[in-house]
Image (cartoon, rainbow, N blue to C red):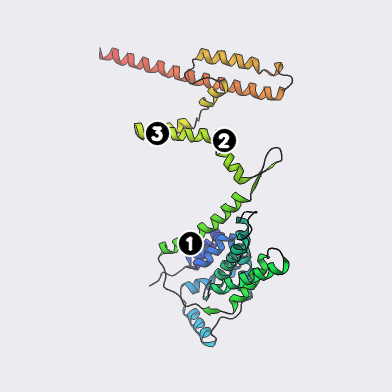
């Protein structure tokens, strides 16, 4: 016997995770769950809000309540195809439009023929998914044909790219004339359901990633705009990334050579939590520098960058002077702590040695 779905639990999931469509996933309405997740709560929360009074019917459908099944059989007997629903039709248009725009954003701006091929496809997918929610179904070929006919006709008439909303309207009209009632299919395993959802999620995330890579821009401190893809490429050639990669590659080689027992300690050390490495870098010293060398270097740099000696760039000198002072204090504190620890260790060893004697 199938597990009965709880109306109360469904509302709890709707309230907390409804924008991600998890309440529909709980009820076995996977297509609706995917549409809600990919369009931010059913086209920016519209579907999520409508679920507030639709959930009881969804739960009855999931539980195969007798009255619901009998009513469905009566509808099928009276007419071959479902009656027209303004809400479903509007949903097909909105989701088709959303997917069409998402696909268009994911295509590079300098692409010529790709929008004419992929945008109608994205619109058709949105129309098809909404049309197959719940107990209704239709074939994908009808919104696909409608999308391409509308795209070609509008492009020819206007001489420009066809608007995704008009394409979605025609695709939804084509879909309306070829709808059927959907019998409840055999339930797939949860793993199989997740595979389909993961595939759809991968496609949507790839589209957003493509949009960010090809079309998104970042603004520098000078007000100059730089393509995100150029900024990413420059980042992977930047000193920060190269140093980061060198550190982690060194940790990997050290782990392979001497084992992974101390990997965590080496990892924490590489993160420089006390700022020791950065302090040596600021003072221009290596890690084997003595306390006297640190002190001499600090005095030299402090004199060089003292604000009173740099009246032309006093703000920069003040910042540099404080940075040098902080680096010196960090290294002095660490050196003092280590010297104290070494003294205690030698003292404990001597006491232990005398006791044994």
- Give the alpha-carbon distance from disc 2 to disc 3, as whole Å: 22 Å
Residue 154 in picture, x, y percent from top left: 69, 69
- Give the alpha-carbon distance from disc 1 to disc 2, as whole Å: 37 Å
Q: Residue at x 63, y 16 (%)?
A: 302
Residue 289 in picture, x, y percent from top left: 49, 17
Q: Residue at x 58, y 54 (%)?
A: 208
Residue 244 in picture, x, y percent from top left: 50, 35
Q: Tell me the mark number nearer the camera, choosing from 1 and 2.
A: 2
Mark sitting earlier along the chain (3/1): 1
Among all residues in the image, which is located at the extreme left? 357
What number is the disc on residue 197?
1
Q: Label 1 neighbourhood size at 10 Å, few (<14), some (14-19), many (20+)?
A: some
Q: Which residue is mark 3?
A: 253
Residues under numbered marks 2 and 3 in contact, where contact means CB atoms less than 8 Å apart? no
What number is the disc on residue 238?
2
Which element is circle 1 on? helix
What number is the disc on residue 327?
none
Residues under numbered marks 1 and 2 in contact, where contact means CB atoms less than 8 Å apart? no
Q: Residue at x 26, y 15 (%)?
A: 356
């Amino acid at each position: 016997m199938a597990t009965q779905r709880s109306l109360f639990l469904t509302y709890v999931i709707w309230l907390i995770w409804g924008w991600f469509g998890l309440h529909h996933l709980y009820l076995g309405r996977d297509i609706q769950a995917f549409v809600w997740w990919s369009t931010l709560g059913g086209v920016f929360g519209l579907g999520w809000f409508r679920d507030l009074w639709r959930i009881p019917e969804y739960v009855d459908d999931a539980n195969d309540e007798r009255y619901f099944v009998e009513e469905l059989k009566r509808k099928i007997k009276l007419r071959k195809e479902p009656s027209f629903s303004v809400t479903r039709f509007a949903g097909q248009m909105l989701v088709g439009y959303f997917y069409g725009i998402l696909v268009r954003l994911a295509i590079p701006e300098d692409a010529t023929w790709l929008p004419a091929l992929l945008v109608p496809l994205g619109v058709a997918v949105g129309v098809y998914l909404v049309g197959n929610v719940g107990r209704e179904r239709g074939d994908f070929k009808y919104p696909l044909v409608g999308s391409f006919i509308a795209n070609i006709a509008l492009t020819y008439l206007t001489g420009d790219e066809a608007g995704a909303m008009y394409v979605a309207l025609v695709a939804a009209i084509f879909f309306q004339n070829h709808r059927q009632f959907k019998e409840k299919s055999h339930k797939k395993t949860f793993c199989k359901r997740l595979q389909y959802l993961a595939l759809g999620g991968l496609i949507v995330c790839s589209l957003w990633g493509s949009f960010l890579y090809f079309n998104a821009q970042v603004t520098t401190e000078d007000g100059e705009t730089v393509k995100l893809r150029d900024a990413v490429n420059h980042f992977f050639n930047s000193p920060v990334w190269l140093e980061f990669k060198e550190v982690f590659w060194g940790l990997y080689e050290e782990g392979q050579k001497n084992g992974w027992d101390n990997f965590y300690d080496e990892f924490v050390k590489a993160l420089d939590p006390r700022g020791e490495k950065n302090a040596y870098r600021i003072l221009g010293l290596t890690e084997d520098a003595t306390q006297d060398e640190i002190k001499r270097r600090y005095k030299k740099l402090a004199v060089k960058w003292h604000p009173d000696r740099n009246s032309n760039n006093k703000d920069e000198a003040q910042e540099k002077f404080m940075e040098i002072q902080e680096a010196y204090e960090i290294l002095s504190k660490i050196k003092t702590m280590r010297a104290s620890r070494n003294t205690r260790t030698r003292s404990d060893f001597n006491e232990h040695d005398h006791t044994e004697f």
